[in-house]
């Protein structure tokens, strides 16, 4: 059975041993590893125990072979928004529903109102609706596999202008963006 235990565990920043200790009753890191990789059968009992340990709904631990899962596609660092070496599965909050492709931005360095450790969920918006994104936070792809993330301050038929978060940042203009994704949800650890 294909499962998302590893994706969820990594997204929450936990080790195999930490998940094992959180299980009730506790188990070994080796057992969790075997369940993650499919070397051991993921029974309903194990699925519920691990879901409780990860503090997620059990359904999040399963995925179909053909399901298109949302991906973390970029991260925000001191140098700005940048692409990940390879996109990784993101844990989908249950509050996000509706149309448009979902993606996530992982915040690694504080910028403006965003703190290190935050995760921003974004939704791809059709070009016909880009005008309504003025004064909203958006992620925009740039050339060379790069990204820009900031408040959209201007738009016309061929370009968008963003103001990146943080003091002293300069406006970024992107010509003919392939897509725009608007920030819909901020996930912050307490």
Image (tube, grey):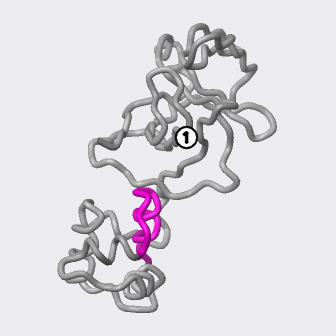
Residue 19 in the image: x percent, y percent? 34, 72
Quarter the C terminus occupies = top left
Task: Please report the residue visible at 49 percent of the width from the left and 37 percent of the height from the top.
Answer: 116
Which range is magenta? 1-16
Q: How many marks?
A: 1
Horizontal arrangement in the rendering, residue 160 relative to residue 90 (left or right): right
Residue 2: quadrant of the picture: bottom left
Question: Could you tell me which residue is drawn at 59 percent across and 46 percent down?
Answer: 73
Q: Is residue 2 magenta?
A: yes
Residue drawn 56% across and 18% down? 166
Q: Is residue 146 above or below residue 136?
A: below
Residue shown at the point (40%, 39%) measured from the top left: 99
Where in the figure is residue 100, as x and y percent of width and height?
45, 39
Q: Quadrant of residue 15?
A: bottom left
Horizontal and vertical percent position of residue 7: 46, 64
Q: Which residue is mark 1?
A: 108
Camera-side residue of 19 and 59: 19
- The kind of secondary structure element at disc 1 is loop
Identify the image quadrant of the N terminus: bottom left
Q: Is residue 40 above or below residue 165?
A: below
Magenta stretch encompasses residue 103: no
């Amino acid at each position: 059975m294909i499962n998302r235990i590893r994706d969820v565990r990594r997204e929450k920043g936990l080790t195999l041993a930490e998940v094992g200790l959180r299980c009730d009753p506790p188990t070994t890191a080796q057992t969790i590893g075997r369940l993650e990789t499919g070397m051991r059968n993921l029974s309903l009992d194990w699925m519920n125990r691990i879901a409780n340990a990860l503090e997620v709904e059990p359904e999040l631990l399963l995925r179909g072979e053909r399901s298109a899962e949302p991906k973390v596609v970029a991260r925000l660092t001191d140098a700005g928004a940048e692409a990940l070496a390879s996109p990784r599965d993101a844990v989908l909050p249950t509050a996000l529903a509706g149309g448009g492709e979902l993606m996530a931005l992982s915040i690694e360095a504080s910028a403006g109102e965003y703190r290190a450790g935050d995760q921003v969920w974004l939704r791809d918006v059709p070009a016909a609706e880009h005008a309504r994104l003025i004064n909203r936070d958006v992620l925009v792809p740039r050339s060379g596999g790069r990204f820009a993330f900031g408040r959209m301050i201007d738009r016309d038929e061929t370009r968008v202008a963003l103001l990146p978060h943080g003091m002293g940042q300069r406006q970024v203009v992107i010509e003919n963006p392939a897509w725009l994704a608007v920030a819909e949800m901020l996930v912050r650890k307490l």
